[in-house]
């Protein structure tokens, strides 16, 4: 590629607007147990697209722990989770008003 073409190609590339990746959709679940002291929650959940997990019931860590405030067993929730090695961490938690 000749220099003027290379410069034009680089100029075009750097003029493109940066687009943030679409956030993964929130997953749905039902709270089975809350352990605020350990910052953990047990959820019966549907598929979790962000980590490729099928529906099941399991314990998640919660970061930050304040997300558990006001959450009780039996609540329906929408949540976001991430995986770090063998840890599964809820990073967003919203109680669904019924």
Image (cartoon, helix red, strand yellow):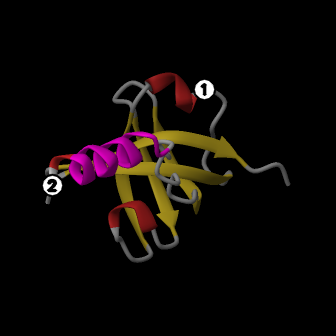
Q: Is residue 47 above or below residue 25?
A: below
- Closer mark to the observer between disc 2 and disc 1: 2
**19 vs 55, nearest the viewer:** 19
Q: Measuring 37% from the left and 40% from the top, which residue is drawn there? A: 14
| Image quadrant where residue 10 sits | top left
What secondary structure is the stretch in magenta mostly built from?
helix
Total numbered labels: 2
Say which element carries label 2: loop
Q: Specify which label sits upstream in the sequence, 2 or 1.
A: 2
Q: Is residue 82 left or right of residue 43?
A: left
- Asked if residue 17 shows in the view, the reply is yes
Query: Could you tell me how far apart the alpha carbons at marks 2 and 1 are, in whole angstroms?
Result: 62 Å
Q: Which residue is mark 2?
A: 2
- Please identify the quarter of the rendering in which residue 58 is found: bottom left
In the rendered image, residue 74, in percent from the top left (x then y), is placed at: 65, 54
Above or below for 66 versus 5: above
Task: Please give the range of residues in magenta.
Answer: 4-16
Q: Position of residue 68 (x, y in %)?
A: 54, 31
Tell me the residue at 75%/50% (across/down).
96
Please check the rendered image and state whether residue 34 is part of the magenta-colored stretch, yes or no. Answer: no
Horizontal arrangement in the rendering, residue 29 relative to residue 56 (left or right):
right
Q: Quadrant of the C terminus?
A: bottom right
Q: Name the residue: 45% across, 28% down.
A: 36
Regarding residue 60, the answer to whether it shows in the image is: no
Residue at point 35%, 52% (across, down): 59
User: To which quarter of the image does residue 35 belong?
Assistant: top left
Circle 1 packing at 10 Å, graded few (<14), some (14-19), many (20+), is few
Confirm whether the magenta stretch covers residue 8. Answer: yes
Residue for badge 1: 69
The spot of residue 1 in percent (x, y) is: 14, 60
């Amino acid at each position: 590629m000749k220099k003027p073409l290379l410069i034009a190609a680089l100029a075009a590339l750097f003029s493109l607007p940066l687009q943030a990746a679409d956030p993964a959709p929130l997953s749905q679940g039902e709270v089975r147990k809350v352990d605020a002291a350990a910052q953990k929650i047990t959820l019966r959940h549907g598929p979790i697209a962000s980590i490729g997990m099928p529906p099941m019931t399991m314990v998640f860590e919660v970061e930050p722990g304040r997300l558990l405030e006001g959450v009780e067993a039996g609540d329906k929730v929408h949540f976001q989770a991430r995986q770090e090695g063998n840890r599964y961490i809820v990073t967003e938690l919203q109680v669904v008003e019924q």
